[in-house]
């Protein structure tokens, strides 16, 4: 059975056709322009395949409340032309198949829970630290929604006493995205992250913020697996530094052998490489059937 998936990001949209076991048979990437033209291209792509369902992991914020009149919409976004955009309705009308829909990061955590590093657990989080910071939350066997959906990339953090950078988020000076995202690194240090690989102070500060955030997520969500990814986490040494800072911030309060003995297996990179998002989208499609 063929299932379609879309990982819909602010700069590009990845489409794939796979099967219900997450094997990807074909994929194509399109630049994100305006909804009408980009969705038109995606719809033509899927019309070439006999898909039975479609799953979409989408940049947000989104309306995920099925009782709402604007369910399946991107709601307010600074991205021009995309505010109040009806994503689910557009694809459902054009393709005539069930459409599963969630945030990009919820899609990614679902991919890792189904086929990746978090298989077999009841609760897991997927934290991406890149152009933005986002957190997908899988709790007690399902994706977490609520009043809206978690926006844990914007949790407020304790600032490092020597960090005087103003912050990057237009809403909060001291949130995780404001202090630790890729654009924050570039603005604070004057260069992109990958050009700062040998500057220890850059990564110590990143680990201080990411470690603090992950400690907060452990305290609130109690995940059995923490998956970290995004452009910033491609700096491999950061994993060890973040693990150390997580332990430091928890300061022994949360007592579990995963933290004391197996933290290398607890805070990990995705097992699906660069594919948790697109495979998660295919899983969202399977679940929509
Ligand atoms: Zn913020």
Image (spheres, rainbow, N blue to C red):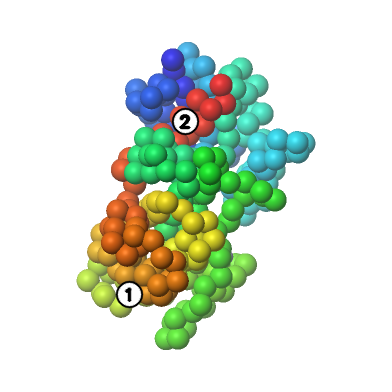
Residue 265 or 195: which is nearer the viewer? 265
Element carrying mark 1 = helix
Task: Report whether residue 58 is seen.
Answer: no
Tell me: residue 199, above or below residue 79. Answer: below
Tell me the crowding category of disc 1: few under 14, some 14 to 19, or many 20 or more residues within 10 angstroms, Cα based: some
Q: Name the residue under label 2.
A: 283
Tell me: residue 168, above or below residue 231. Answer: below
Q: Name the residue under label 1.
A: 204
Are the residues flagged by discs 1 and 2 in contact, CB closer than 8 Å?
A: no
Residue 135 or 72: which is nearer the viewer? 135
Residue 234 relative to residue 47: left or right: left
Residue 73 relative to residue 8: left or right: right
Residue 11 or 112: which is nearer the viewer? 112
Residue 52 or 12: which is nearer the viewer? 52
**Image location of residue 204, percent across then percent down:** 32, 74
Residue 145 relative to residue 25: left or right: right
On-image quarter of the N terminus: top left
Tell me the crowding category of disc 2: few under 14, some 14 to 19, or many 20 or more residues within 10 angstroms, Cα based: many
**Image location of residue 106, percent across then percent down:** 51, 44
The residue most toward the bottom is 162
């Amino acid at each position: 059975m063929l299932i379609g998936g879309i990982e819909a990001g602010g700069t590009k949209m990845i489409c794939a056709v796979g099967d219900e076991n997450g094997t990807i048979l074909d994929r194509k990437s399109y630049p994100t322009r305006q909804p009408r033209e980009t969705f038109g291209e995606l719809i033509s792509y899927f019309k070439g395949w006999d898909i039975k369902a479609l799953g979409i992991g989408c940049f947000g914020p989104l309306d995920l409340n099925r009782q709402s009149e604007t369910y399946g919409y991107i709601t307010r976004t600074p991205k021009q032309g995309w505010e109040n955009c009806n994503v689910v309705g557009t694809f459902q009308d054009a393709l005539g198949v069930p459409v599963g829909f969630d945030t990009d990061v919820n899609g990614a955590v679902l991919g890792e829970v189904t086929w990746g590093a978090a298989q077999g657990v009841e609760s897991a989080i997927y934290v991406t630290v890149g152009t933005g910071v986002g957190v997908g939350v899988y709790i007690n066997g399902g994706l977490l929604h609520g009043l809206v959906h978690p926006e844990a990339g914007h949790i407020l953090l304790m600032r490092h006493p020597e960090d005087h950078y103003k912050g990057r988020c237009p809403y909060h000076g001291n949130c995780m995205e404001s202090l630790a995202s890729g654009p924050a690194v570039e603005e604070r240090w004057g260069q992109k992250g990958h050009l700062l690989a040998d500057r220890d102070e850059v990564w110590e500060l990143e680990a201080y913020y990411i470690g603090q955030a992950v400690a907060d997520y452990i305290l609130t969500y109690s995940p059995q697996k923490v998956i970290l990814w995004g452009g910033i986490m491609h700096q491999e040494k950061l994993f060890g530094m973040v693990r150390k800072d997580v332990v430091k911030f928890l300061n022994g309060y949360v007592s579990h052998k995963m933290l004391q003995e197996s933290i290398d297996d607890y805070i990990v990179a995705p097992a699906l490489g660069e594919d948790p998002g697109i495979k998660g989208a295919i899983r969202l499609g399977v679940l929509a059937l």
